[in-house]
Image (cartoon, rainbow, N blue to C red):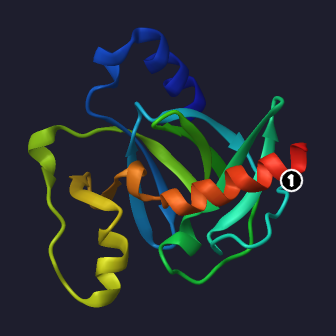
Amino acid sequence: MAEELIEELVEEGEDAQTGKFMTFQTGKEYFGISISYVKEIIPMQPITAIPEVEDYIKGLINLRGKIIPVIDVRVRFKMDPTEYTDRTCIIVIDVKSTVLGLIVERIAEVDTILDDDIVPPPALGKKDNEQRKYVYGLARTGDTVKLLLDPDKLIKQDALDAIEDNQEKEQS
């Protein structure tokens, strides 16, 4: 269902994407990412591990001939890793012309969240600051609070460089 909504929104153009967020669950938390970053949602795929990269980078997948890195959102947020299930999927996003996959436990829905409904995250303890680095706002939808992610901050530039170096070594 979420895949059809994404296709509709992409076909309708940027105006239809304004205020739309793909929401997903990781652990007990709900997160949202602007639909403008989301390219597609795919089921879990075989992942090729990459040596000597950050632990949250699970490896590379082959998506219709294009090799893309995938990161585990749970591990990125310093949560305990969990087994992947039939509900685990990969949200393929495009951040500054870099395509990558986010491994998430469960897709929730596409939500409309207006700018007026977004508040900055509060400054709490050190553990919260780990997630806060990637969260630019909080939004209440229905009876849940969703943490809105800044995809630019999910993956460090040096990690991207290491992935590219490994890809170049494999191709030569």
State the residue at coordinates (59%, 84%): 80
Q: Where residue 112 appears, x then y in whole percent?
A: 28, 35
Q: Which residue is mark 1?
A: 46
| In the rendered image, the vertical position of residue 37 relative to residue 60, given as above or below | above
Q: Quadrant of residue 15?
A: top left
Q: In this orientation, which residue lies closer to the viewer: 171 or 101?
A: 171
Q: Amino acid at mark 1?
A: Pro
The reply to whether residue 131 is in sight is yes
Q: In this orientation, which residue lies closer to the viewer: 83 or 108?
A: 83
Q: Where residue 143 appears, x then y in whole percent?
A: 26, 59
State the residue at coordinates (72%, 64%): 58
Q: In this orientation, which residue lies closer to the viewer: 131 or 59?
A: 59
The reply to whether residue 105 is in sight is no
Q: Where residue 14 appears, x then y in whole percent?
A: 34, 17
Residue lying furthest top: 12
Q: Is residue 101 left or right of residue 5?
A: right
Q: Where residue 154 appears, x then y in whole percent?
A: 46, 59
Q: Quadrant of residue 110?
A: top left
State the residue at coordinates (14%, 40%): 115
Residue lying furthest left: 116
Q: Quadrant of residue 73?
A: bottom right
* Crowd band around label 1 with a 10 angstrom C-alpha radius: few (<14), some (14–19), many (20+): few
Q: Is residue 9 left or right of residue 74?
A: left
Please identify the quadrant where the N terminus is shown.
Answer: top right
Task: Tell me the element at label 1.
Answer: loop
State the residue at coordinates (52%, 33%): 97
| In the rendered image, the vertical position of residue 26 relative to residue 171, given as above or below | below
